[in-house]
Image (spheres, rainbow, N blue to C red):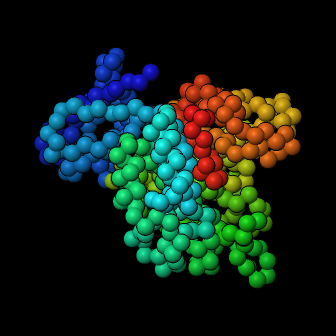
Amino acid sequence: MKQIFFFVLTSTLLYGWNGHLIDEKSLQPVANATVSDSKNLVKSDINGTFSIDTNETILHVKAYGYRPFTISKDQNLSEFHLTPIQVKALYLTFWGASNHSPRLKRALHIIDKTEINAVVVDVKNEYGSTVFWTDFQQANDYGAHLKRTNKDIQKFMKKLKDRNIYTIARIVTFKDELQASNNYEYAIKKNDVNKSVWRNHDGMAWVDPYDDRSHKYAIRMAEEAAKVGFDEINFDYVRFPAKQGLCLLEENTQKNRINAIGRFLDEAQNKLRKYGVFISVDIYGNVCWSKDDNGIGQTIESLAKHTDYIAPMLYPSGFASGSFGKKYPAKHPYIVIYRSIAHIQDRIDPVRVRPWLQYFKDYTRSKVPYEKEEIRKQIQAAEDANTSGWMLWSPSSKYDLNVF
């Protein structure tokens, strides 16, 4: 059921704004929404009331399960609507986000015809390349723009905004070949005599999550996405490599890892506040079931403190045989999704969970094709678990209209 919320605002003096968040249907107050200027934020209280002291003329409002909303004193209005949204997103690869890509054309056709209302776009990929030209000179000096696939980001964003599509910018964070290969001093290194740059199985180097320079780089990239109008920044690879024995800036303990990730996300929230964007973080699906940080700096509890949404990659093919009491978890997509989300609801409200769902063939021994039935069961599970949406991961960005 969709609900429309009224945002009632009164302006008192130049430096103070007071207002209420009101549910139009029930006339009940909306609590715990974030109202902010570029530097400060307040929460609406149990009565839906807020008061913020500021001399700025723009405020941003964020409430879980709603589109981000910007208000201006120049509007001279007293009521503003916050639009609810259950995000139903398709992932567009670095190559699929071109204005001339058949993948984009197909995705837009599906959006025009179905319930799909959002896209996730690779703004910076694992290699470190940007999908469009940015004003981030450091990245451009490394050649991040040379392989860009979108030559007119304004045209691209207009296509999406004209359809009222919710836009999510995926930023691959600490896995970054370009940044690491150009910054030996804070690239993750092997713990050997030569201290050579470490690369994982696909030949990509990483930057050290303990080093503030890696934080500033990723956040600066996120600002470029916010500037062109994305509604949300989705940080992927916001973690340490799942590899022991590497040479890192700090002692590699669970406490230190969790603190480093939290420090990064807090800085991102502070820097991105002036754009009014939501921040989400991708995590392994098994983080939902782990009691520790899996050696990578991610727990549900710690991430919930520092981000708006958590996006567990709940691909049934990613769970080992025997998980959920099933020999082949991929044959039981509903159970995998529903139980995983239910398992963490005591640590984070499901409205702040938006899972990645599997839109690719099972690669385990069961070889489930993952067509309409399997995909719809995942979607049903996410909705039954009361999440605020879901995102479909297709490595090729090829989607079938008949699935929806």
Residue drawn at x 25%, y 43% is 71
Residue 371 visible here: yes
Residue drawn at x 57%, y 56% is 93
- Which of the pair 180/366 is nearer the observer? 366
Q: In the image, is residue 330 above or below residue 334?
A: below
- Which of the pair 103/292 is nearer the observer? 103
Tell how many labels.
0
Image coordinates for residue 188, horizontal then vertical, percent: 67, 71
Snapshot quadrant of residue 184: bottom right
Dividing the image into 4 quarters, which one contains the N terminus? Answer: top left
- Which of the pair 17/372 is nearer the observer? 372
Residue drawn at x 41%, y 35% is 66
Residue 271 visible here: no
Q: In this view, does 231 lie to the left or right of 318?
A: left
Residue extending farthest top: 26
Image coordinates for residue 111, horizontal then vertical, percent: 47, 40
Residue drawn at x 53%, y 63% is 124
Residue extending farthest bottom: 194
Image coordinates for residue 166, horizontal then vertical, percent: 43, 43
Image coordinates for residue 157, horizontal then vertical, percent: 39, 54
Dividing the image into 4 quarters, which one contains the C terminus? Answer: top right
